[in-house]
Image (cartoon, grey):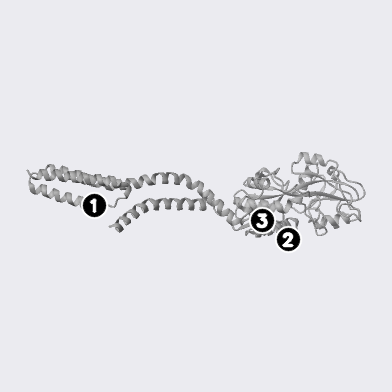
Amino acid sequence: MRSRFVRFQLRDLLLIVVPVLIAIAAATWFTFRFAHPAPPETLVLAAATKGSPYYRYAERYRAIFERNGVKLDIRESVGSLANLKSLADPTSGVDAAFVQGGLVSSNDTQGLSSLGRIAYEPLWVFYSGGKPLERLTELKGKRVLVGPVGSGTSTLAMRLLAANGITAETATLINRELPDYVDLLAKGEADAGLLVLAPEAKTIQRLLRTPDVHLMSFTNADAYAQRFPFLSRLVLREGVVDFAANVPPSDSTLIATTVAVVVRESLHPALVNLLAQALQEAHGQSTVNAAGEVQLFQTAGEFPTNSDPEFAFSDEARRVYRSGAPLLQRYVPFWVATTVDRLMISLVVLVPILIPLLRFAPQIYDWRIRRRIIHWYGELKRLEAAAKSATTSEERTAKLRELETIEAAVDNLPIPLGFADRLYQLRQHIELARRRLTFASRF
């Protein structure tokens, strides 16, 4: 008897608990699969050619990613414009890329967000001959090197030259690879050359030391910075490149763009957050070389920037730069922290589902038990109605036997202790019905 009661009680509980568990599992699966899926195990970063500053930056990020259990796949490219095209192509597989400032239009920034600028990239203008060059307008009628076709150097050079009235009609614009500048300027086969490179680049170092090749100092650098928000004014101090040889021989005012790390807006927030952490670790402090010298044009705390003049800025990156890594990631591994975050988000989805379920589950359980008792009340009422139409003692005796059947069923009814009062009320009503039938059968 007791085992039968336990089976019925367990069945009642399962009929309530199982749907609740199914709802919880479905909501959790939906949250993990669609609302907040797990971050990919790999991030693809488009850099530049091996040995370039971009590639070296990417290698520093890769070490930080590996420390957090995430793979960073560095993809070689020919430069910033190729990187932009990869970001715009949904089939390229590229998630993030280095992009030189000054190359994009408003149409190029759709669907992309910046994690900030990470370094200066000066626009160097070298010229041959003895007459000093101070303004780009002085390049009219000259032979001017503007970098390879489609390169970041060429795009920025043509934009700034056009702003100064220098076009293919007013000057001879020559597209050549940047390393070729040294020989072309040294041999007098070109009058000037514009190129965008980091100061430690070999081509820059060679040009600064080439006889009869001079670095132009912009007298109107502030005007460029005011007109073009992606440009800044820098000063290369006398002798800072080589004290012994006094390179450069005097202070030179430069204009510089900056390089941004740009990601697709669809990139998983956890990977955006981790990449921002890598940028902060790699660029937040001044880079010191093996000789203990600080990299030129880099001041601790200046990079990465928390704004961008050309791209929408990532909210995830802003949170990292303002508050540091997420709290959990400071104490537990990246993957553990992201799993906990996903569970917390799933709770946000589950709570609106669980509250009504847990609220109505006891009521549903109570209804099922009451329904079991009410069923026999219905049978009892039907029996009493039928007994009223009974005209013979045999018919009344048959109704008494039916009543005994109902009573036996009620005696075996699995009812929890909390509903015992209702069960005893039902038994009292059965007994009352028996008395009425017994009394009626005597006449």
- Tell me the distance, in whole angstroms, between the alpha carbons under discs 2 and 1: 86 Å
Query: Residue drawn 26% across and 47% down?
Result: 423
Q: Marks 2 and 3: in contact by CB < 8 Å?
A: no
Q: Dot 1: what SS?
A: helix
Q: Dot 3: what SS?
A: strand
Q: Check disc 1 and report the residue beneath it.
A: 411
- Tell me the distance, in whole angstroms, between the alpha carbons under discs 3 and 2: 13 Å
Q: Dot 2: what SS?
A: loop
Residue 31 showing in the rendered view: yes
Q: Which residue lies furthest to the right in this view?
A: 130
> Which numbered disc, 2 or 1, marks the residue that appears first in the sequence?
2
Q: Is residue 61 above or below residue 254?
A: below
Q: Check disc 3 and report the residue beneath it.
A: 45
Query: Measured from the top left, where is residue 78 in percent x and y?
Result: 71, 56
> Which numbered disc, 3 or 2, marks the residue that appears first in the sequence?
3
Query: Residue drawn 66% across and 56% down?
Result: 45
- Left or right, 260 with reference to 416: right
Badge 3: few (under 14), some or many (20 or more) residues near its Cα, within 10 Å? many
Q: Check disc 2 and report the residue beneath it.
A: 50
Q: Marks 1 and 2: in contact by CB < 8 Å?
A: no
> Which numbered disc, 1 or 3, marks the residue that appears first in the sequence?
3
Query: Measured from the top left, where is residue 216 in percent x and y?
Result: 86, 47
